[in-house]
Structure formats: C-alpha cells, structure tokens
Image (spheres, grey):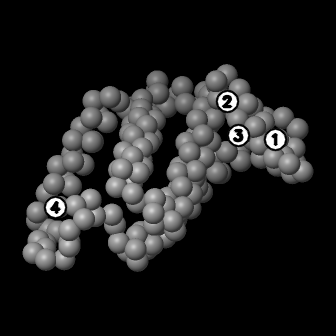
Amino acid sequence: SNMAFSSIAHICRDVNNGWVIRNLHANGASFFFICIYFHIGRGIYYGSYLFKETWNIGVVLLFLVMATAFVGYVLPWGQMSFWGATVITNLLSAAPYIGNDLVQWIWGGFSVDNATLTRFFTFHFILPFAIAGVTMLHLLFLHETGSSNPTGLNSNPDKIPFHPYYSHKDILGCAIFLALLAILS
C-alpha cells in the first residue's frame, strides 16, 4: 500500500501521456454518472418506474456503479482516499447484528490498512463484470416489458430501420462525448 500513491504519481509524471489516461479514467467515471442521472431522470419523467422489475434492476445497477466508483476513489491511497474509506465503511457498522463484522470483513482487519487496499483493488476490477451481467439482465427485462413510450401512441406503424438513421445519430453523440472528455482531460 505504501506504493499505491507513488505509482499514481509515477504514472502521471513519468509515463508518456499517463496523466491523460488517468484523467480520462477519472473524468470518464464522472461523465458516466452524468449519463446515469439523465437516464434516471428520463425514467422518472416518463414513468418507467412502473415497470418494477426493470426499475429495481436499474437501482441495483446504480448501487453497483456507486460501489465501483467508491472503491476506485480509494485506490490512490492519499489522505482523502484513506479517510473516505474509513468514514464510508464505518457507516456499515450501523447495520444491526452484522455491522461490525461486515466492516471488519471489508477492511480485512481492525482498521483501514493494506488488506483494505488490496480488497478494494479486487472489487474495482471485479465489479465492472458484475455491472455488465446485471446490465444484460436489465436489458432482458426491458425487452420483455418494452421501453416507456412518451407519446402514448402506437409505436408499431411506419417503423424506420435503426441503421443508418439512428446509428449516425448515436455515432455523433458518442463523438461529442469523447471530444468533451478529451478536452476536460
């Protein structure tokens, strides 16, 4: 753990364009949350929460993404990371009966230490795979229930193909997103 902070400093200072990679990763996570919040807002506005299974799986996805971002925040192992890990993980001690044992299991001991950093690195690596799996489940439920139709009209007549009409729009949006991310990094 004594090398975690130094390795980030080394990547940012000594590796060619390492600072770009780190900033893309950090700012990309922030952009991802912005997209998630817009998605949630759209779902609330159009009443997607009425499809309970799909909505609840989306809530699970939100918590998984938040957990991934939190453990990633701890990985540089600076003072803010250390105390953030200490405070947030201590919140779990409020869980009845299992709280203290849960906190000690997450810490890997009796305080935030090397074992905690190793566990958080493992969680930061494994949780995106869980997110991908739950996302597929979310899409499966969405396919079953259908997405919210804001117009309230029959959506079946006069359909147009996805490609080229919508794929060009999606490519443009992705390009704008990547350009903004590159500018901010």
- Nearer the observer: mark 3 or 4; the answer is 4
Task: Give the residue drawn at x 81%, y 41%.
Answer: 94
Alpha-carbon distance for marks 1 and 4?
48 Å
Amino acid type, callout 1: Ala
Q: Amino acid at mark 3?
A: Leu
Q: Dot 1 corresponds to which residue?
A: 94
Q: Position of residue 26 (x, y in %)?
A: 46, 35
Choose the circle earlier in sequence order: 4 or 2.
Answer: 2
Task: Estimate the spatial distance between the alpha carbons at disc 2 and disc 3, rounded to whole Å.
Answer: 12 Å
The type of residue carrying mark 2 is Gly
Residue located 45% across and 72% down the image: 141
Mark 4 Cα shell of 10 Å, populated few (<14), some (14-19), many (≥20): few
Vertical position of residue 114 compared to residue 140: above or below:
above
The residue that disc 4 covers is 166
Label 4: state its secondary structure.
helix
Which of marks 4 and 1 precedes in the sequence? 1
| Callout 2: SS | helix
Q: Earlier in the sequence, mark 3 or mark 4?
A: 3
Mark in front: 1 vs 4? 1
